[in-house]
Image: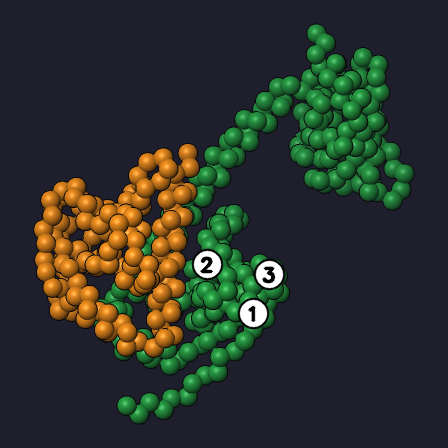
Chain colours: A orange, B green
Amino acid sequence: MAIDSFLHGYIVKEEIVQHNVTIIEEGTKGDWMYVVLKGKVKVKKQTPLEDITIDTLGEGNIIGEIPFFLKPFKSRTASVISVGRVKLGILDKERLEHEYELLSPQLKSLIKALVLKLKETTEKVSLLAAVR
Amino acid sequence: MNEVRKIPPITHLLYVRGELIIKEGDYGISIYKILKGRVRVFKTSNNIIIHLATLGRGEVFGEMTFFNLSLEPRSASVIAIDDVELEVSHSTRLIEEYKHIPTILRYMTKQFTNRLLNMNSVVETLNKKKRQKKKENEESELDERRYVRKKIYQDCIYRPVAHPSKLELRGVVKDISPLGLGIEVIAKNTINFSHDLGAHLKIKFRLPSGSSINEVAVIKSIKKSKTPGFLFLGLEFENIDKDAIKNIGFFIMMP
C-alpha cells in the first residue's frame, strides 16, 4: 500500500527498527504518534495468563493515537512490536494538536468517543482472549 | 467566515427500559448522547446475542456510521437498560464540518472506525468460542448427572401443577436421581395439556424399595422416546422433600 501523500507533510522524523523491537510499551507514558511507512507491526496486550496479539497493522496505519486523543490520559494501552524490519514516521504532534483544537467541541467529542471505544474494546478483546 | 446554515434542532428522546434504540442493519446517521440511564450495545449472530458494551451518562453512540460517511447500515444494536433520556442530533452542520477538516484527521477517524469494526468482530468470534466451550462443559456435566441416574421402571401418575382441571395423566418413570427423573409418556397425553419446557408437574410413584414419592418437577427436555408413539421427558425436582432425597439416595446406592 502506498502512503497517502498528505501524510508526508506531517512526518517530522523517520526511523527504522529491526525485527521484534518494542516501539510502544504498554503501561509506559507517552503521546507520540507514528505512522507505519514500511513493514508490519503487531499490537500486543498483557493479560493475566500471557501476552496476546490483538491486531497486526501494516503500512499507512497510525499507531499510538490513544493518549493523543484521550488527554490527559497518558498511559499506553497496548504494546506495539515490529514484525521484521519496519520503517516508521514520527508524526508532528504540535501541528496535529493545533489542527485538532480547531474542530468544534461536538466533533471533538465524537472523535473522543470513538477512540475511547477503541481503547475499551482492545481491553475487552484481551480479557476474552485470556479465557481458556 | 459567513456561516449561515440552518442548524437542525437537537431532539430529546425518551426510551423505556427494554426498548430498542438502534437496530443492527438499519440505516441512519443520527448521533446519540446519553443524558440519563444506561444502554447496551450488542450484535446478533445466529440468534446469539453478543454483548459489546454498556454505555452510560455522557457517552455517545451512533458515531461510527457518521465517521464512515457512508450509507452503511448500523453495525450493532442498542437497547435501553434503564429508562433512558437521549439527545439526538442529526447534524448536517457536523457532517459539513467533518467533510472539511484536515485530511489526516478524517484519515485517522476512518482508520479507527475500521479498527473498531474489526475488534468488534474479534469480540464476536471470541464470545462464540467461549459459549461453545461453556456448552461442552455443560454437556459433560449433564453426562455425569445421567450417569448417577439409576434405571427403573415404575408406573406413575402426574398432573400439571398450573392446570385448572384436576387432570391426571399416566406415565412410566425410567430413571431417577436425587436431582431429577426421566419419564416416558404416551404422546396423546399432550392433547389435554401441552408438555412444554418449564412446565411444573406433580409426580406420584413408588420406588422399587417401597417408599412413595410425591414431588414437583420441572420439564427440562422433551424427546421422542425409543418406543414409538411415546415421549421421553427429562425433569428436575423442585423444592424436593428431604425424606424423598434420602429415600432416592438409598435406593440409588442399593446394589
**Between residues A120 and B151, which one lies in front from this camera angle?**
A120
Q: Is residue B24 above or below residue A123?
A: below
Bin the neighbour count of mark 3 within 10 Å (Cα to Cα): few under 14, some 14-19, many 20 and up. some
Of helix, strand and loop, which one carries label 3?
A: loop
CB under 8 Å between discs 2 and 3: no
Q: Amino acid at mark 3?
A: Asp
Q: CA distance from mark 3 to mark 1?
A: 9 Å
At 66% across and 34% down in the image, what residue appears? B221
Q: Nearer the viewer, residue B219 or B212?
A: B212
Please determine whether, in this image, residue A28 is positioned above or below residue B183.
Answer: below
Q: Residue at label 1?
A: B85
Determine the secondary structure under disc 1.
Answer: strand
Q: Which mark is residue B82?
A: 3
- Specify few, some or many for label 2: CA neighbours under 10 Å numbering under 14, 14-19, or 20 or more: many
Instruction: State which mark lies toward you, 2 or 1.
Output: 1
Task: Give the image location of residue B159, x and y in percent.
Answer: 83, 35
- Tag 2's secondary structure? loop
* Dots 3, 1 in contact, CB < 8 A: no
- Subunit under mark 1: B
- Residue drawn 62% across the image and 19% down it: B147
Q: Are marks 2 and 1 in contact (CB under 8 Å)?
A: no
Amino acid type, callout 2: Ala
The chain letter under disc 3 is B
